[in-house]
Image (spheres, rainbow, N blue to C red):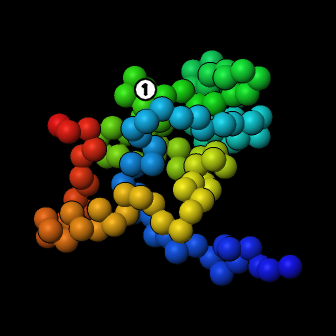
Amino acid sequence: MADPWYADGLNFTCTACGTCCSGEPGAVWVNDDEIAELAAHLGTTPTDIEATYVRRLGSRRALLERFDGDCIFLDATSRRCTVYAARPATCRSYPGEGRCGYYDFLKFERRTQNNPEFVAQTNNE
């Protein structure tokens, strides 16, 4: 049996741009353990997390999104995850591919702008 495609690690460098946490609507699935981890991280209870940050989609639970598709835990100004240390498995494993589709574009923009901190806006503002 051949080694899985990811056996040698992923060719991916996260730039923490926040793009994978915004844009098109999607579902960040959460389970009881992840809800408890979020609660501990935020200093609250799992019941409060479910009431404030979680929605039901059929028989499953997912994090809420803002009207524009951004994750409820994405800080709109800094474009950073506010619960990064306690983020769910869906977030930890994303994109699950060799490289983020935004990665090359962001590297180009940062080089062109001569600013290693530059974050290109994706909402045409």
- Residue 14, horizontal then vertical, whole percent: 45, 64
Label 1 CA crowd tier, 10 Å (few <14, some 14–19, many 20+): few
Residue at the far left in the pictured view: 113
The one of 77 and 100 positioned closer to us in this rendering:
100
Q: Residue at x 66, y 73 (%)?
A: 6
Residue at 45 percent of width and 48 percent of height: 20
Q: How many circles with numbers are drawn on the protein?
A: 1
Horizontally, residue 89 falls left or right of residue 3, namely left
Please indicate, yes or no, whether residue 30 appears anywhere in the rendered image: yes
In the image, residue 36 sits, relative to residue 120, either above or below, namely above
Q: Is residue 102 left or right of residue 81?
A: left
- Is any part of residue 72 visible from this angle? no
Above/below status of 10 relative to 41: below
Asked if residue 123 is positioned above or below residue 98 in the image, the reply reads above
In this view, the residue in front, 17 or 52, is 17
Residue at disc 1, secondary structure: loop
Measured from the top left, where is residue 125 in percent x and y? Answer: 17, 37
x%, y% of residue 68? 37, 28
**Residue toward you, 100 or 81:** 100
Farthest residue toward the right? 1
Q: Position of residue 10 (x, y in %)?
A: 58, 73
Instruction: Give me the residue at 41% from left, 58% from top.
Output: 101
Q: Which residue is mark 1?
A: 66
Q: Amino acid at mark 1?
A: Arg
Residue with the most extreme top position:
51
Quarter of the figure that contains the N terminus: bottom right
